[in-house]
Image (spheres, rainbow, N blue to C red):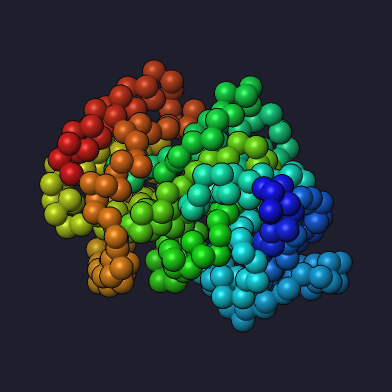
Amino acid sequence: MSNSSSISDSFVSIVILNYNGSEYIEKCLKSVYTTVGCKFEVILIDNASTDGSQLICKKKFPQIRLFQNNANLAIAGRNIGIDNALGKYIVFLDSDATVHPYWLQNLIKSYLLHGEGLYQGKILRMNNTDEIVSSGNLLNIFGFGYARGSEEKDLGQYEKFMQISFPVGACIFSSLHVIKKIGYFDESNLLYLMYDDVDYGWKSLTFGISSFYEPTSIIYHPASTSSKLDSHKMFLLERNRWISLFSYYSTKTLVKIFPLFAIIEFGLFFFLLTKGMGFAKIKSFFSILKMANAIRQRKIQLNKNRKLPDNEIIIHFVNEIFVPGFMTKSNFSIFVSNVIKCLSGFARNLI
C-alpha cells in the first residue's frame, strides 16, 4: 500500500473538550468538517456546560459523538476520548481552535515518516494569521515552558520539522497506541487550568516518547493566556510549574540544583514585585506546602512505570527562556534570559 493511500485510509479520532463554548465551538466544528485527506470521527466531550452549546452542536452536527459529563472534569475530560476513540490515530483539539483543511493529513504523513511521538502543528493567531502563536513548545530546565516564535510575524522562519520539549495543548496528535502507552491526562486536578500540556509532554518523556513540531499542519488559535497575565494566572503558572517539578524530578536532582533554584526563585519574586504580582508568588509557595502530600502521592503514581532518568530527559529541555515583550523592556529581558541561560547550563552539568 502506498503512503498516500495509507494516509487517506487512516481513521482519526478528533477529541474536543467543551465548556460553555458558545463563542467558539460551532466555528471550530465547522472548520473540522472541512478536513480532507483522511477519515475521521469527532468526539465532543462536554464538561457540564450551562449555555446549551453542546446541544446546539449536536443538532447542527448530528454526526458527532457527544459525551456529557455531570461535572467539569477539566483536562481529565480528554480521558473519556481516550477510552472511547475508534481511530488508529487521535488528536486533542481545543474548542476555540480552527484548522486548515490539510492539517490532519500532514500530521499523519509526518507521523508515518518520523515515527512514534506526540506531534503539534504550526499554531497561528486566529484573527491575525501572519502572527505565530507556537512553532513548537520548549521547556527550560527550571520548568519554564514557552512557545517558540510566539509574537513573531510568520515569515517562513520556522518551516523545518524538529524535535521539541512538549506539544502545545491546543492540538496534540499521536497514535492511540502511543497515547495509551503514556496514559491519561492529569486526573488529580492539581494542575487545574494551567500547565497541563507541559505536564503531559514531560510525562511522555519519562516513557522515552518524544514530541515533534510539524510546520505543514496549520491550526489557528486566539490570543494565548500568556498575553493576558494577571496575578491569578501568575499564581496558577507558578504553582503548577512547581507541581510538575516536584512530580517528575527525583529528590536527588532537586537537592543537587536547589541553590540554583533559590537564585531563580528570589530573582523571580523581586521581578514580580515590580509588576505588582509579588503576592502571587508568595501565595503559590504556601499553596505548594498545603498540597505537599497530594503532590507526593502524585509523584509516586507517575514514577511507577517510568523508563528514563532525569539526565536522559533533560536532553529534550533547553537553557533559554522567553520573556514576553509586555512583561519587561527588551534590554532587561535579554539580561534575565542570559542569567537563566547561564544558571541552566550549570544545572544541566549537575543533573
Q: Measured from the top left, where is residue 190 in percent x and y?
A: 40, 66
Residue in front for this viewpoint, 299 or 277? 299
Please identify the residue farthest to the top as the structure is shown.
331
Position of residue 129 in the picture relative to residue 160 (left or right) = right
Residue at the image point whose x is 69% and y is 68% from the top: 43
Residue 60 position, x and y percent, is: 86, 67
Give percent across and percent down for residue 316.
35, 42
| Residue at image point 18% right, 44% down | 351
User: How many marks are shown on the rendered structure?
Assistant: 0
Tell me if 190 is positioned left or right of 59 in this view: left
Q: Residue furthest right?
A: 60
User: Among all residues in the image, which is located at the extreme front?
Assistant: 1
- Name the one closer to the observer, 196 or 115: 115
Residue 187 seen anywhere in this rendered image of the structure = yes
Residue 45 vs 272, above or below: the answer is below
The answer to whether residue 72 shows anywhere in this view is: no
Question: Residue drawn 65% across and 37% down?
Answer: 216
On screen, residue 140 above or below 331: below
- Examine the image and state in which quarter residue 142 appears: top left
Residue 57 found in image quarter: bottom right
Residue at image point 84% right, 71% down: 62
> Is 244 on the left-hand or right-hand side of 215?
left
Front-lying residue, 282 or 263: 263
Residue 56 point in image, percent of width and height: 82, 69
Side of 223 where 26 appears, left or right: right
